[in-house]
Image (cartoon, rainbow, N blue to C red):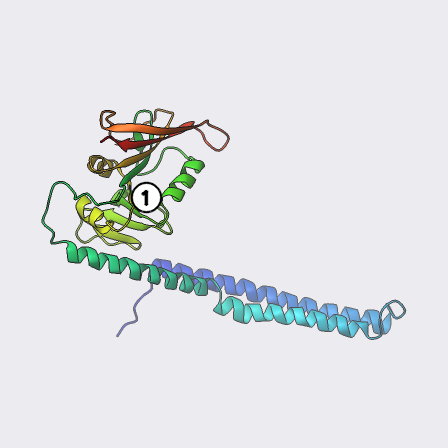
Amino acid sequence: MANKSNTPNEDREQFLYAQDRIRQKKRLNQHFVFFLIGSAFIIILDQVMGVGHEALPQNWYVWAILIWTFFFLIHAFNVFFTNRFMGKKWENEQLDKLKLKQQKRIDELQKQVEKEMPLPEVKTPKPIKNQTLTIIAAASENDALGKDNDLVWHLPNDFKRFKKLTTGHHIIMGRKTFESFPEPLPNRIHVVITRDKNYKKFGAVVVHSLREALELAKKDDQPYIIGGGEIYKQSLEYADKIELTRVHAEVTADTFFPHIDENKWELINEEHHPKDDKHEYAFTYLTYIRKD
């Protein structure tokens, strides 16, 4: 039977690993040559030229060579053991173990979703007692959210606020929003809504309707809707609270936040932040709650 060929990525990783090992061994060989020449020079200084006989302890050159030998052995140990068995490959293996633990939790939640999928379809999700469903978003003056599945601004303080509010909670989103992340956000349960029945991604609990998403998050007292535009539009009718960062600019976009009807929503807090060297635009945090 023919051996299974490596993928291009695997070939590249093996090449880079071999290249790195060659550099490590080359540096060790250079150290060894320098060590031999240096040791011989130290012996000549003491035995032939008499350097240090009065100022330094007797047989000082022996101690100097022994100390240097110790550091050389550490170098050799790092090359042949630490860097070989605990290098990048080892780091990746440890990371994979952590990912597997997280994926196990995700799989348990996914089984719960699949078990509850036969629920009868209803238009309006059932309200959950003592739960505050919150929409969190950043939108410009013309309600722009982003373009080409990415934000059109960089607001570090808004990212910090988003992290502070959503950490420890379910964050509900569409597939495109999830795929815009370089990797799943830590310490949050990612609930991804998609029509694709076969969609599976590491770090995502996949559901196929807003109802399923809210059912999954029913034990969370503060789940968050984080996008994109269509998910915001669907959930606006059922949310209890909106945390909106209003970016004071008008930008070109292909995704927009739905209009907030002031007859249904009451603005209870606003906090303005001027632009500075880290924030290209001024922005204001706006907090709305649904009117009774």
Instruction: Residue 23 in the image: state x and y as whole percent.
Output: 55, 62
Instruction: Residue 64 in the image: state x and y as whole percent.
Output: 75, 70
**Quadrant in which the C terminus is drawn:** top left
Is 47 drawn above or below residue 120 in the view shown?
below
68 relative position to 85: left or right:
right
Graded by Cα atoms within 10 Å as few (under 14), some (14 to 19) or many (20 or more), the crowding at tag 1 reads few
Q: Residue at x 30, y 34 (%)?
A: 242
Q: Quadrant of residue 27?
A: bottom right
Q: Is residue 209 visible?
A: no
Q: Residue at x 26, y 41 (%)?
A: 133
Is 136 drawn above or below residue 90 in the view shown?
above
Q: Residue at x 14, y 53 (%)?
A: 117
Instruction: Residue 31 in the image: state x and y as whole percent.
Output: 65, 66
Q: Nearer the viewer, residue 124 or 141?
A: 124
Figure disc tally? 1
Q: Is residue 271 visible?
A: yes
29 relative position to 265: left or right:
right
Q: Residue furthest left?
A: 120
What amino acid is found at the position of numbered circle 1 in the picture?
Ser
**Quadrant in which the N terminus is drawn:** bottom left
